[in-house]
Image: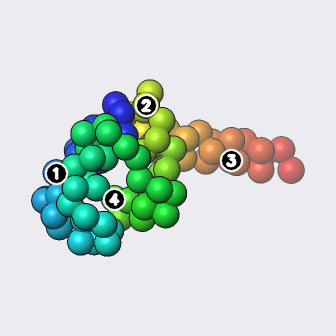
Amino acid sequence: MTFAEKLKTLRSQKGYSQEELAQVLHVSRQAIAKWEGNNGMPDINNIIAISRLFDVSIDTLLKEESDLHTHKTLREADIIACGSFIGAASSLY
């Protein structure tokens, strides 16, 4: 998924119109349309704001190979793997 596709999906999932998202981010509706149309990218401050608003990492937003669903699954798997590693390491001491 591209950033444009992810932004549109996240916005739709939260029930925001382009106008409402624009108001939250303090940008124009045209800026949102441009980003969702894959005709430009937001600046770093807006990327951070989008990441926080939709509770997704910046990596998830920007990496084309990751989609929104896969990232959640990997995130949960990473947490489980870390827990297993910590448990195994603590049993050594």
Label 1 environment density (alpha carbons within 10 Å; few <14, some 14–19, many ≥20): few
Q: Earlier in the sequence, mark 3 or mark 2?
A: 2
Q: In the rendered image, which residue does mark 1 sit on? A: 12
Q: Is residue 88 visible?
A: yes
- What amino acid is at disc 4? Phe
Q: Residue at x 63, y 45 (%)?
A: 82
Q: Is residue 15 left or right of residue 67?
A: left
Tell me the distance, in whole angstroms, between the alpha carbons under discs 1 and 2.
19 Å
- What amino acid is at disc 1? Ser
Q: Quadrant of the N terminus?
A: top left
Residue 87: mark: 3
Tell me the distance, in whole angstroms, between the alpha carbons under discs 4 and 2.
17 Å
Q: Earlier in the sequence, mark 1 or mark 2?
A: 1
| Residue 9 in picture, x, y percent from top left | 23, 44
Q: Is residue 33 left or right of residue 84?
A: left
| Residue 48 in picture, x, y percent from top left | 47, 61
Task: Label 4, secondary structure: give it.
Answer: helix
Task: Label 3, secondary structure: give it.
Answer: helix
Q: Earlier in the sequence, mark 3 or mark 4?
A: 4
Q: In the rendered image, which residue does mark 2 sit on? A: 64
Q: Residue at x 46, y 41 (%)?
A: 62
Tell me the distance, in whole angstroms, between the alpha carbons under discs 1 and 3.
40 Å
